[in-house]
């Protein structure tokens, strides 16, 4: 797993507010550009004029009075040209916000949520974190317009209301060719005016991913720990489709959803056939999932036939399907057309049992958290 | 103490629920079929149905959860069902607003075949008497292009339409000319026995993207027995014709229809094999219609609905078995019914529509300028019953024809949702109104359903399809594939 945030020892820095800055490895940028870049360097000598310098040396020789200089360890060797970080010059606290070479740039907008899902990977916190939204605004202004895909997640980003719409509008202006995925529980869109405001953004490649965990309203409400959530989510999806927005339905598979997975897919096929994509997702063993592991864990190998049946239902009705977060050796062969390597690169690993497997390159692998806490007992190398 | 609540917390403590409109019909001794307003079905025991309607159903039972998620009831926990039902019902009726898509031109009643079951053809050399004139064709096209439908399909029928191929060419070229301003999705089909097809005709078809629909009743002996012609070589001509069409137009540009006769009944597997052998990927098991010479020659009475149903089931089982062996082959009648059972789309099959498909789905311009509400209507007219004649292309306006009492009365009266017995029937969403059929046999648009072969035949097929799906997961998967084609 990549280390995406931590504290860097401050070698010298002026007092000030945290700021976002784009990284470069180019020691000889024109002076005009240096003030907008942070230099990643292994050299002992620090050139003048960069906004910040991340050095692999504890005591680099520098005559610069303008640069904030930090020591950076080998944990961050993944950082590269064009990446964007947030750095606090007072404390050295750094977070990687954007990796130029990655297809998995997800921007956390808030930790607040009106659901409280049993398997939440980002447990909600009830405090004002609207600075995250402001930071996201700066971030989309810094990202290159060649960025292929970004995600906005939470928490529940729609709790910002107008604030989220403004961010999406800014994103459209700065990144008109970038695919944008928003993760939401969809409940806010039960308000048709909000759905219309969302449409007004007019982003050409914007998809909203909304979870539906069961065709049984009570079970869905239980999984998300919120009474009435099912009805609001369904109404939200209907409203979004009324205004022709792209909607992906996401179903997380675990012990509380597996028994009605086929019925849930039938429900989607009969009632929500107009959605653009359905993702059936394996469990990530992080956040609340760890606390609720006993009531959530089921070995994917045990449910592989149910997964196949569910996928066949969706496929028959012509829905676009993806199966996320599963390993190739625990799904049936008929999953192949829908199988995606979905686990973000920075938290994707293999386990010991994988050694000798011929399909490692095609396999989606494991969440780092699965490797650490729980994964299928039926992982076997595929050798033919 | 966990900060997470148990599932019970999310259930309203109140036991009350409200029923949404639904219907139920026994499937067999132990089970009922229940259908919701949008035609989604569930099976339940008699006891469950009784508990449900008496508001005694246990909220913790699996049946309760299934019934709620399939929109048979609402309670304090969820009430999104009516909105979803409304969308589904609207979707299933969306074709109505399109109005007439299929326009059948009977370009000649003449035919060189003399099939005993044929409903309408004439053995005559008299072109003037039984061929459509350009004037009538032109007036029929005027009406065709008045249809609000975005999709217009012109089908040439007979008799044998290729006996009047010059008129076909005239109509195609004239229609294309008009379509330059009308901008419809225009398609053409010729329904022909292929005995008279030539490369030259097919070159015209290729140029104008005309599809071919032909007849194939089964193996050579059966086909030739059903379809006598001079030379006794109808089968050979059809097979050679099919090959020629594929060569000239492309493999999927020809489809075939079979007619079931008494002679067909014992040989359903041989009929399917004949379709397989000639490269078709499916077959439509049609019941024999009771019109035309079929009634006059008593061939209709020669076998009753139950014998056809045995034939149908045997054929369907054979086709299921083929699929189990890895050979993809579809029975299109089942596929049409399954689409109504398993999706919100109405496939628009004229015999299974309510309101009836007459003039709404298809309209017939006869060779002599008469306009009929359906192919069956003109057949009835050939038997002397002119009730479903809507007007005349040379004399009547579009408005007069399509709001004629001969159309509106049977449409209104036969609408199955409000017809006695159909109204209570769980299978009504899968079924249709057939006022022409019922008028032909019972002199009544609605008909007495206990005596209706239409009702008996369809009910039996519906129950059979459901039973097979429920008892065999392979069949469920296969049928889902057919229904969602």
Image: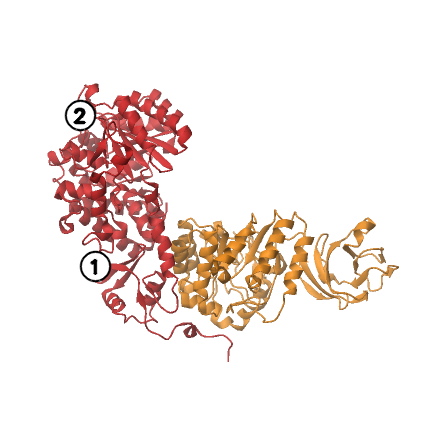
Residue B214 image position (x, y, % from top left): 28, 31
Pointers 1 and 2 within a single chain: yes
Q: Based on the displayed image, in which of its 4 quarters is residue B27 positioned? A: bottom left
Please say if B361 is above or below A78.
above
How far apart, in angstroms, are the residues tagged by discs 1 and 2?
A: 47 Å
Chain that the image shows in orange: A
Nearer the observer, disc 1 or disc 2? 2
Q: Which chain is red?
A: B
State which quadrant residue A290 falls in.
bottom right
Q: Residues within 10 Å of mark 2 (few under 14, many from 20)?
A: some
Above or below — where is A3 with respect to B196? below
Report the residue marked by disc 2. B122
Callout 2 secondary element: loop
| Up-down relation of residue A315 to residue B218 (above or below) | below
Q: Tell me if B211 is positioned left or right of B393 in this view.
A: right
Looking at the picture, tell me which residue is in the foreground, B368 or A326.
B368
The mark that comes first in sequence, 1 or 2, is 1
Indicate the quadrant where residue A78 lies. Answer: bottom right
**Residue on which the image places disc 1:** B28
- Number of the label disc, if any, that sits on residue B361: none
């Amino acid at each position: 797993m990549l280390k995406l945030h931590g504290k860097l020892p401050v070698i010298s820095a002026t007092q000030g507010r945290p700021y976002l800055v784009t990284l470069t490895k180019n020691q000889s940028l024109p002076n005009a550009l240096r003030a907008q870049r942070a230099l990643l360097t292994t050299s002992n000598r620090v050139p003048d004029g960069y906004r910040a310098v991340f050095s692999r040396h504890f005591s680099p020789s520098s005559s610069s009075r303008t640069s904030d200089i930090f020591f950076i360890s080998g944990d961050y060797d993944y950082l590269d040209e064009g990446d964007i970080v947030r750095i606090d010059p007072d404390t050295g606290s750094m977070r990687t916000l954007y990796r130029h070479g990655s297809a998995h740039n997800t921007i956390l907008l808030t930790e607040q949520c009106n659901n409280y899902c049993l398997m939440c990977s980002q447990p909600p916190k009830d405090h004002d974190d609207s600075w995250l939204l402001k930071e996201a605004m700066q971030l989309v202004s810094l990202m290159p317009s060649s960025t292929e895909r970004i995600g906005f997640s939470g928490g529940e980003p729609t709790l910002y209301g107008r604030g989220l719409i403004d961010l999406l509008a800014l994103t459209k202006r700065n990144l008109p060719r970038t695919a944008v995925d928003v993760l939401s529980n969809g409940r806010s869109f039960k308000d048709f005016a909000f759905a219309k405001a969302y449409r007004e953004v007019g982003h050409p490649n914007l998809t909203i991913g909304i979870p539906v965990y069961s065709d049984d309203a009570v079970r869905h409400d239980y999984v998300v720990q919120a009474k009435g959530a099912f009805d609001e989510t369904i109404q939200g999806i209907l409203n979004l489709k009324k205004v022709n927005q792209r909607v992906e339905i996401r179903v997380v598979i675990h012990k509380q959803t597996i028994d009605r997975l086929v019925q849930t897919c039938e429900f989607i096929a009969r009632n929500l056939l107009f959605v653009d994509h359905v993702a059936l997702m394996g469990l990530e063993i992080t956040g609340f999932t760890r606390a609720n592991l006993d009531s959530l864990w089921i070995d994917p190998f045990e449910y592989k036939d149910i997964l196949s049946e569910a996928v066949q239902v969706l496929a028959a009705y012509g829905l676009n399907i993806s199966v996320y977060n599963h390993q190739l050796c625990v799904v049936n062969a008929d999953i192949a057309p829908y199988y995606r390597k979905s686990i973000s690169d920075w938290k994707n690993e293999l386990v010991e049992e994988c050694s000798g497997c011929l399909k490692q390159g095609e396999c989606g692998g494991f969440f780092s958290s699965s490797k650490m806490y729980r994964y299928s007992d039926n992982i076997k190398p595929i050798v033919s | 103490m966990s900060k997470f609540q148990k599932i019970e917390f999310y259930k309203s403590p109140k036991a009350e629920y409200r029923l949404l409109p639904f219907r139920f019909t026994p499937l067999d001794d132990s089970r009922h079929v229940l259908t919701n307003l949008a035609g989604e079905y569930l099976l339940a025991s008699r006891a469950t149905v009784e508990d449900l309607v008496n508001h005694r159903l246990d909220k913790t039972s699996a049946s309760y959860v299934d019934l709620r998620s399939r929109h048979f009831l609402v309670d304090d926990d969820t009430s999104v069902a009516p909105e979803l039902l409304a969308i589904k019902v609207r979707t299933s009726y969306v074709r109505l607003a399109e109005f007439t898509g299929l326009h059948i031109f009977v370009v000649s009643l003449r035919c060189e075949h003399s099939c005993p079951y044929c409903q309408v053809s004439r053995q005559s050399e008299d072109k003037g008497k039984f061929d459509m004139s350009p004037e009538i064709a032109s007036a029929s096209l005027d009406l065709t292009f008045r249809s609000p439908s975005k999709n217009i399909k012109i089908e040439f029928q007979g008799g044998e339409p290729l006996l009047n191929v010059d008129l076909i060419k005239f109509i195609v070229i004239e229609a294309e000319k008009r379509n330059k301003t009308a901008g419809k999705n225009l398609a053409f089909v010729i329904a022909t026995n292929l005995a008279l097809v030539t490369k030259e005709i097919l070159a015209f078809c290729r140029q104008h993207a005309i599809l071919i629909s032909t007849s194939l009743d089964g193996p050579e002996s059966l086909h030739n027995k059903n379809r006598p012609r001079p030379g006794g070589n109808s089968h050979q001509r059809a097979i050679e014709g099919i090959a020629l069409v594929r060569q000239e137009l492309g493999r999927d540009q020809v489809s075939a229809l079979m007619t079931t006769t008494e002679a067909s009944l014992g040989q359903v597997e041989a009929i399917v094999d004949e379709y397989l052998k000639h490269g078709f990927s499916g077959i439509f098991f049609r019941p024999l219609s009771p019109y035309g010479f079929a009634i006059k020659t008593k061939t209709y009475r020669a076998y009753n609905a139950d014998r056809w149903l045995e034939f149908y089931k045997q054929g369907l089982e054979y086709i299921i078995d083929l699929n189990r062996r890895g050979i993809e082959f579809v029975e299109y009648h089942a596929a049409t019914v399954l689409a109504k059972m398993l999706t919100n789309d109405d496939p628009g099959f004229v015999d299974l529509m309510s309101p009836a498909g007459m003039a709404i789905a298809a309209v017939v311009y006869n060779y002599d300028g008469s306009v009929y509400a359906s192919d069956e209507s003109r057949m009835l007219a050939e038997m002397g019953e002119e009730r479903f004649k809507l007007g005349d292309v040379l004399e009547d306006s579009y408005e007069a024809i399509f709001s004629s009492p001969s159309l509106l009365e049977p449409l209104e009266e036969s609408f199955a949702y409000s017809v006695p017995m159909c109204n209570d029937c769980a299978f009504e969403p899968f079924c249709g109104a057939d006022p022409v059929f019922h008028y032909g046999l019972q002199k009544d648009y609605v008909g007495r359903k206990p005596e209706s072969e239409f009702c008996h035949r369809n009910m039996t097929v519906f129950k059979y399809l459901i039973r097979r799906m429920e008892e065999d997961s392979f069949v469920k998967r296969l049928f889902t594939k057919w229904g969602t084609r």
